[in-house]
Image (tube, grey):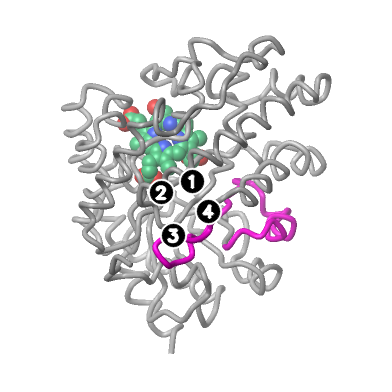
Amino acid sequence: MAELKNDRYLRALLKQPVDRTPVWMMRQAGRYLPEYKATRAEAGDFMSLCKNQDLACEVTLQPLRRYDLDAAILFSDILTVPDAMGLGLYFETGEGPRFQRPTDTIDAIKKLCVPDPEDELGYVMRAVSTIRRELKGEVPLIGFSGSPWTLATYMVEGGSSKTFEKIKKMAYEEPATLHMLLDKLADSVILYLNAQVANGAQSLMIFDSWGGALSHHAYREFSLRYMQKIVDGLTREAEGRTVPVTLFTKGGGLWLEAMAETGCDALGLDWTVDIGDARRRVGHKVALQGNMDPSVLYASPARIRQEVEQILASYGEGTGHVFNLGHGIHQHVNPEHAGAFINSVNELSVKYHK
Ligand code: CP3
């Protein structure tokens, strides 16, 4: 078993005692860092950065050089899977991700194949093993994917959407077609995440960024059901350690009990829920990750510190909490404010772990 110098993040996810609350930030490698922008310019564009294992490794490590973080996250994107299914991913400046060939008809969905992670997604696997080697056991490496529902929104809409017009029409009028797509995606994600573990990922996170756009019933039918299938299909042990699984549905605060029932190890929380309340609801079953509003980082270091203390106090004493933002860090955040956030968690959390 490879030695891990700092396993606070893995321990907290499994609710084992820790000396302080571990912390990392969603999108910690990204445009708020000048060194990220420089490496991205060197790569040419975002997808070329993802496809170059040495540069992807470099940007993964950049936030760890600046800050006292307890985990690294693979530098990649959730949309690598639909791209590998043949949709032709590209990024239009200022408009976010787009697909050349959206899958909004039954014929297009029937033709989709489950990608071989070591082939079409081999560049992600090479990034995972390169990052794992270069981390030299300092902190654990998080692998990730999108949830089937969230991936399907991009695939059916052809890119980012605010209204989810096409996919919701499909959900209500042609549910069997959408289920076929979600099922293929769940199979693809299982293979993809298990391959990440085989290549060195030590923890897994599933991003369901758009689950919160669904109704109470539709969430269970179109999002949770497929995350359940994934949880059931994942490798949960590697190198003699548990590989914890975290589910994050943005806007899913009302459904935490149902999410905890899947058998995952932890739930990611956005900033709309009180973490102490979430702990009372599901804390006997799962660990919790979150949940400071990323916009707090626009405020002063003193204000950031206050907000960190409030969240720590709300969670209360003991393990089972991984500090994070409630969503990804924004690109216009001052990197020093991100540092103030991380230092505040590291300093203020000690008293909750006696
Ligand atoms: O957390 C990390 O540091 C790891 C890397 C990571 C990225 N994307 C890098 C990225 C992760 C975990 C993601 C996940 C992701 N990608 C999600 C789920 C999480 C969430 O934010 O809800 C989603 C929905 C996507 C799809 C996607 N990719 C969007 C909407 C965008 C932004 C487009 C834009 O121009 O603003 C991307 C691109 C992307 N992925 C960037 C990064 C750092 C910015 C690309 C750039 O450098 O221009």
**Residue 235 circle label:** 4
Q: Residues within 10 Å of mark 1 (few under 14, many from 20)?
A: some
Mark 3 vs 2: CB contact within 8 A: yes
Residue 266 is drawn in which quadrant? bottom right
Q: Is residue 136 above or below residue 28?
A: below
Q: Nearer the viewer, residue 181 or 59?
A: 181
Residue at (38%, 64%) from the top-left corner?
23
**Gap in angstroms between the C-alphas marked 3 and 2:** 8 Å
Identified by mark 4, the residue type is Thr
Q: Position of residue 231 (x, y in %)?
A: 62, 51
Q: Which one is earlier in the sequence, the residue at label 4 or at label 1?
A: 1
- Could you say whether the residue bearing mark 2 is in a helix, strand or loop? helix
Question: Is residue 247 part of the magenta span, yes or no?
Answer: yes
**Gap in angstroms between the C-alphas marked 2 and 1:** 6 Å
CB of mark 4 near ligand 1 (< 8 Å) = no
Q: Position of residue 11 (x, y in %)?
A: 44, 72
- Could you say whether the residue bearing mark 3 is in a helix, strand or loop? strand
- Could you say whether the residue bearing mark 4 is in a helix, strand or loop? loop
**Gap in angstroms between the C-alphas marked 2 and 4:** 9 Å
The residue that disc 2 covers is 198
Q: Which residues are magenta?
A: 236-265
Mark 2 vs 1: CB contact within 8 A: yes
The residue that disc 1 covers is 194
The residue that disc 3 covers is 238
Mark 4 vs 3: CB contact within 8 A: yes
Left or right, 206 with respect to 61, comes to: right
Q: Residues within 10 Å of mark 3 (few under 14, many from 20)?
A: some
Mark 4 vs 1: CB contact within 8 A: yes
Q: Which one is earlier in the sequence, the residue at label 3 or at label 1?
A: 1
Identified by mark 1, the residue type is Asn
